């Protein structure tokens, strides 16, 4: 097991982390100085003096993800694929006993990504508690996989996974969420091992930028998961629906002068074609559910149910006084995320890899 500690502007707590690991384990340690200021030089000089510690350094600050990649690249060049990696934060919030348990869990699940997950009990800063709760919910919504602590820095995986880890995008905190997204896409098991929740001095030493880093994280969750493909599929099928509707209107006008009949045939034909296209787009391109059984029947039933709910909500809103021309839009906005979740969870459900606790 190789311990990786990315560090930016660390204080004496980094020395405590390194000291505890060298005293309680025989793990080799790689510390990455991510372009810290000269004021931190005494800390890194002290780190270098420990046995079994390798210090790697960036010329400037590149981000936590970049620091981890630097360590992973070094490990890939100097250690065999049979070894294992565990990442630990530099601020003393990960206890050695918890890191050891995460390592033991990886031994039982050698092909998995093991997370040291916090329950967020006790005196947890509001920003940390709420931020994790929101990210947990968004991750669950976009991927369909339950992970309780999506932002933990205590993680373990086999060195054999390093090529994939190096290929992932993201140089800052978004890199860690990208690891999880990659695992859900590629059916790599995510296993959670409960660890102690430790926050020192209200987490003041954290370099997480609430706005910039949150934006990077949520951009990945919405743009690199099936959700953005679902949106693209829906828009494409809307264009198909309208094109078929217009074509059928022109065609039926040659056979009947009744506007109602033309409209009924055109709407029905357009909906059949666009719904069929939407089914195949979502099955094979969005959710990649090639083994989904009875999915077409489920799709038809779900579409009918959603249509019924939509009609009921629209009629109810109009009865309450809402404008009949405007109410259609908020109803669609409300039902669209529900449609996405139900299609992923029921219609095109694959055998998901859920996290274990």
Image (tube, rainbow, N blue to C red):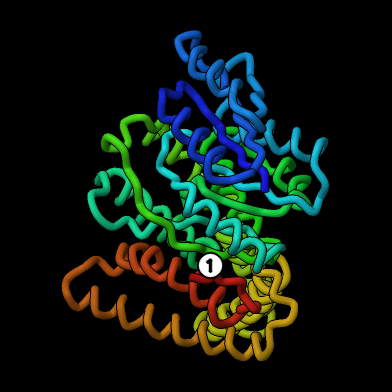
What's the residue at 61%, 47% (across, down)?
86
Q: Which residue appears at 56% of the width and 78% of the height? A: 267
Q: In this figure, which residue is indicated by the disc labeled 1?
A: 145
Q: Residue at x 65, y 68 (%)?
A: 108
Is 115 placed above or below 342 here? above
Task: Locate residue 330 relative to residue 40 in the image: left or right.
Answer: left
Q: Residue furthest top?
A: 38
Please give left or right for residue 338 compared with residue 314 in the image. right
Q: Note whether residue 65 is visible.
A: yes
Residue 109 spot, x, y in % from top left: 66, 67
Q: Is residue 239 visible?
A: no
Q: Is residue 287 above or below residue 102?
A: below
Pick whichever, 60 or 47, lies toward us: 47
Question: Which x, y percent locates residue 269?
Answer: 63, 81
Comparing 99 with 275, the one in front is: 99
Residue at image coords 68%, 34%:
71
> Quarter of the image holding residue 31?
top right
In the image, residue 35 sits, relative to residue 291, either above or below, namely: above
Image quarter of residue 285: bottom right
Compared with 40, 3 (above or below) is below
- How far across and down, in percent of the image, does residue 114 sit? 58, 59
Q: Nearer the viewer, residue 345 or 248?
A: 345
Task: Tell whether 286 sits left or right of 76.
Answer: left
Q: How many residues crowd mark 1 within 10 Å: few (<14), some (14–19), many (20+)?
A: some
Across and down, in percent, residue 294 comes to: 66, 91
């Amino acid at each position: 097991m190789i311990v990786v500690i990315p560090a930016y502007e660390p204080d004496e707590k980094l020395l405590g982390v390194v000291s505890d690991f060298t005293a309680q384990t025989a793990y080799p340690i790689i510390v990455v100085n991510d372009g810290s200021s000269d004021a931190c030089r005494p800390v890194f000089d002290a780190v270098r003096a420990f046995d079994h510690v390798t210090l790697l350094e960036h010329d400037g600050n590149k981000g936590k993800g970049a620091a981890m990649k630097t360590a992973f690249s070094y490990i890939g060049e100097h250690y065999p694929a049979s070894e294992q990696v565990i990442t630990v934060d530099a601020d003393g919030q990960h206890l050695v006993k918890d890191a050891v348990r995460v390592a033991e869990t990886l031994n039982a699940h050698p092909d998995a990504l093991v997370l040291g997950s916090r329950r967020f009990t006790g005196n947890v800063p509001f920003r940390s508690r709420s931020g994790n709760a929101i990210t947990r919910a968004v991750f669950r919504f976009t991927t369909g996989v339950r992970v309780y602590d999506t932002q933990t820095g205590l993680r373990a995986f086999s060195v054999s996974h390093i090529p994939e880890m190096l290929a992932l995008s993201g140089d800052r905190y978004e890199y860690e969420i990208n690891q999880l997204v990659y695992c859900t896409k590629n059916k790599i098991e995510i296993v959670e091992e409960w660890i102690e929740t430790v926050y020192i001095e209200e987490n003041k030493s954290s370099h997480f930028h609430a706005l910039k880093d949150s934006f990077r994280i949520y951009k990945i969750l919405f743009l690199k998961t099936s959700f953005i493909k679902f949106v693209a599929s829906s828009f494409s099928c809307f264009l198909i629906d309208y094109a078929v509707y217009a074509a059928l209107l022109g065609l039926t006008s040659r056979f009947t002068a009744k506007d109602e009949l033309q409209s009924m045939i055109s709407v029905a034909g357009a909906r059949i074609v666009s719904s069929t296209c939407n089914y195949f787009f979502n099955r094979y391109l969005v959710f990649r559910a090639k083994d989904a059984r009875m999915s077409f029947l489920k799709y038809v039933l779900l579409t009918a149910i959603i249509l019924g709910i939509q009609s009921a909500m629209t009629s109810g809103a109009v009865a309450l006084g809402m404008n009949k021309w405007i109410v259609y839009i908020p109803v669609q906005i409300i039902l669209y995320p529900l449609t996405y979740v139900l299609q992923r969870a029921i219609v095109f459900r694959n055998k998901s890899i859920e996290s274990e606790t």
